[in-house]
Amino acid sequence: MYRIPAPHTLIGVPQENLGEFTTLTMTLSVQAVKPDFIDWLNCKSEWKCRLTYHRHLTPVLKYISPPVVYQEAEIELVFDPKSIMNKIKDVASDDLPFVQAKIGLANINFEGYVRSDQGFRGWYNNNVRGIVGDQKITNNAPVNMLWETGYAIHDPVTMNTCDYAGTTCYEAKTVPAIYSIDQKEGYVTGGQVITVNGFGFGKGTIKPTIDGVPCTVLTQSADQFTCRAGAASEPTKMTKTITKVVE
């Protein structure tokens, strides 16, 4: 099955340029690309290849919270399904009311959060929660939500998070995360080898510190790294966690 992309993607214009239209109708042409030529497939009847977008049947993805995510993080999607629920009938017991949602190329897992018989209120902000899948570390990952009628369009204002100057914006930013550290205590003399488990350590330079003291990286993989603690000038006076920077 092939699902038509959102109209602004298909036409190649910014989404806000189509804001004044309630419907968009176009004739669909299909071509079969073969090794030595392109074969255009024509419709016997033009109306069978007529494609119409209806604003009231196009869900709108409003925002993702939080916009900074990591693998296995719990996130929330807020969206307005418009009138699409009127078109969705007889959802199988193991399916969702919508087809899928992704951050980058990885699916968001809604198991245990969304039921197949769950309804969503039209022309109203609904929310669903899910778990982020395996992600690449990136400063801007696209967020997409697919329904039976096609992809949801994005609210051009609320779907982007920008810095104060407005020069750097993103839909979702994926970052490394620490899940566990195998040692909770050490010595001011340093020398302990510490194993850190998490996500996003496979590429880049890791610069871990403990209480501000560098911990020299020994091994590094996608979900784990080890480092040797450096000597500290004095014992820790309060509980602090290990921090890192990946470049």
Image (tube, rainbow, N blue to C red):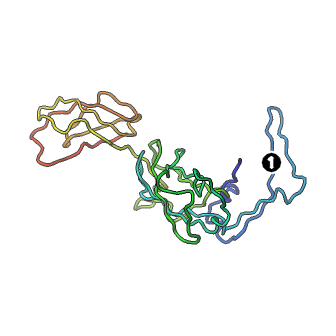
Quadrant of the image occupied by residue 243: top left
Q: Position of residue 2 (x, y in %)?
A: 71, 48
Q: Quadrant of the C terminus?
A: top left
Image position of 226 with respect to 48: above or below: above
Residue situated in front as seen by the camera: 61 or 211: 61
Residue situated in front as seen by the camera: 23 or 181: 181
**Residue at x-position 51% and y-position 57%:** 114
Image position of 224 with respect to 31: above or below: above
The single residue placed furthest to the front in the displayed view is 93
Q: Position of residue 178 (x, y in %)?
A: 32, 42
Image position of 25 with respect to 132: above or below: below
For disc 1, the marked residue is: 30
**Residue at x-position 53% and y-position 51%:** 142
Q: Position of residue 216 (x, y in %)?
A: 25, 31
Residue situated in front as seen by the camera: 109 or 224: 109
Residue situated in front as seen by the camera: 70 or 7: 70
Name the element at disc 1: strand
Q: Is 122 on the left or on the right of 181, as rendered?
A: right
**Residue at x-position 61% and y-position 68%:** 82
